[in-house]
Amino acid sequence: MVVLDLTVMNLALPSAQRSLHFTTADRQWVVTAYALSFGSLLLFCGRLADLIGRKTTFLTGLVGFATASAVGGASVDFSMLVTARACQGVFGALLAPSALSLLATTFRDPKERAKAFGVYGAVAAAGGGLGLLLGGALTSYLSWRWCMYINAVFAAVAITGGALLVSRRPRTQGGRLDVPDVVTVSGGMFCLVYGFSNAASHSWGTPSTWSFLALGCALLIAFAFRQSRAAQPLLPPRVVLDRNRGGAYLTVLILGAATFGLFLFLVYYMQVTLGYSAVRSGVAMLPTVLVSGVVATLGNTRILPRLGPKPMVGVGMLLTAAGMVWLTRIGADSTYASALLGPLLVTGAGNGLIFGMVAATGTFGVAPLDAGVASASINTGQQLGGSIGTALLNSIAAGAAGRYLSGHLHGRPTPQLLQAAAIHSYTTVFWWCAGLYAAGAVLCGALLRPGPLARPETAPTAPAPLPTTAAH
């Protein structure tokens, strides 16, 4: 439900704009409102799940997300829709780390854990493509409002299962939230997400872009400095300084940035150049969805226990890079079978290998009191990577199209020239995405330890309650 919501509204935005009569400039806020609240609150909500109980935060997140979705679907004006999307982001930030940390703390047997994280990886890998398919189908055959209402259906199933099947575990004793830490990291993430979103819709040189990015970096540096000295840090250094977990967080950051190019610009190509409908575009993405789901499950159950995450990340990144290079061969008259099916299968397999290990590795070996914030670190990397990818790749595409037009323009631009410039911008983005994946194979492969995941002999225990005189 959370991963779907990152893409399902994209195809519904034009229809929602016509229905509620808001401007094209305002349209970006329907996406940005969700990204801002979701990205800025993830670490705070992950630690909150550790402190008050993951089942409680899981069910609260489900109910809140479903309610906000229903309100958004019933929106009568732009402000109501944006407010609902912001509330979706708040409850999504509570729900996402709670769900993942429940897996990490519930499944302790290695075989059961491998199956659980294999299914999780399959859902995460398939979610973006399914969002495009579902968004196109709902918008075309029902209404854009059903892109919001559908969450109530998913939530009803999850609430029932969560209430009946998820056991309530003891919450962390003696822990507490440090308010300055919460304010610093939430403010830093807010500024970064806003800055990157502004760069995507305006430019990197505007004060509202670089000033927010600079402030966000400063706040996050201050947050990191505090974590090494705080008695009860919001994000304990022991969580991120482990090589395997740190490698998993870096992997999901790069993956979030590069995957944006696959989904967004490939959909642009199919709909604008090839004339596909929204539904047909979603169906065209199904090979990626199916292959990534199968490979994620097999990778987690068969490869990860034997070989560990290092080869999965290396092979997965290189496979996806090869698929992106293959996509640079698209043209104005390309067919689906000759130009798209093969790359979609290859990138699906690569993404499946990566998603299959990220969730399992990013939460492996953490103490139960850190499971929520470790899970939130994965979601934060994905969200921040997506924001970076949106800004960076949009800028690259716009620059490539402009340079192509200026180099080939003689008089008025013809429709054929404009189409050629658009295709050139897409292929340029695919080359950059291939480079990101190749860099990820080197960087993340070097950071991850070779061999299967080995659980540490001792794990940190919950901290003892602090005396009131030393509570800071």
Image (cartoon, grey):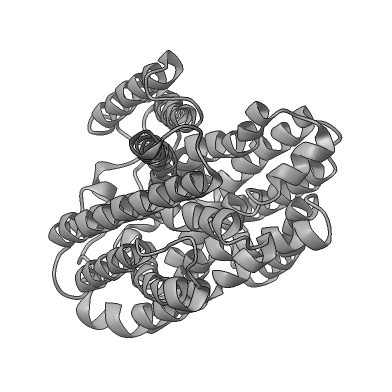
Taking the view exactly as shown, the residue that stands out farthest to the top is 207
Q: Is residue 318 left or right of residue 348?
A: left
Q: Is residue 446 left or right of residue 234?
A: left
Q: Nearer the viewer, residue 416 or 125?
A: 416
**Which residue corresponds to the image point at 47% horizontal and 29% vertical from the top-left?**
190
Q: Position of residue 313 (x, y in %)?
A: 26, 67
Residue 434, by quadrant, is bottom left
Residue 169, can we see it? no
- Numbered circles on residues, count: 0
Q: Is residue 210 above or below residue 29?
A: above
Q: Is residue 23 left or right of residue 439?
A: right
Q: Position of residue 448 (x, y in %)?
A: 18, 61
Residue 349, can we see it? yes
**Which residue corresponds to the image point at 43% horizontal and 58% vertical from the top-left?**
262
| Figure quadrant of the N terminus | bottom right
Q: Position of residue 216 (x, y in %)?
A: 37, 24
| Figure quadrant of the C terminus | top left
Q: Position of residue 407 (x, y in %)?
A: 33, 37
Q: Nearer the viewer, residue 293 or 406?
A: 406
**Which residue corresponds to the image point at 61% horizontal and 66% vertical from the top-left?**
282
**Which residue corresponds to the image point at 38% horizontal and 47% vertical from the top-left?**
381
Q: Nearer the viewer, residue 442 or 285?
A: 285
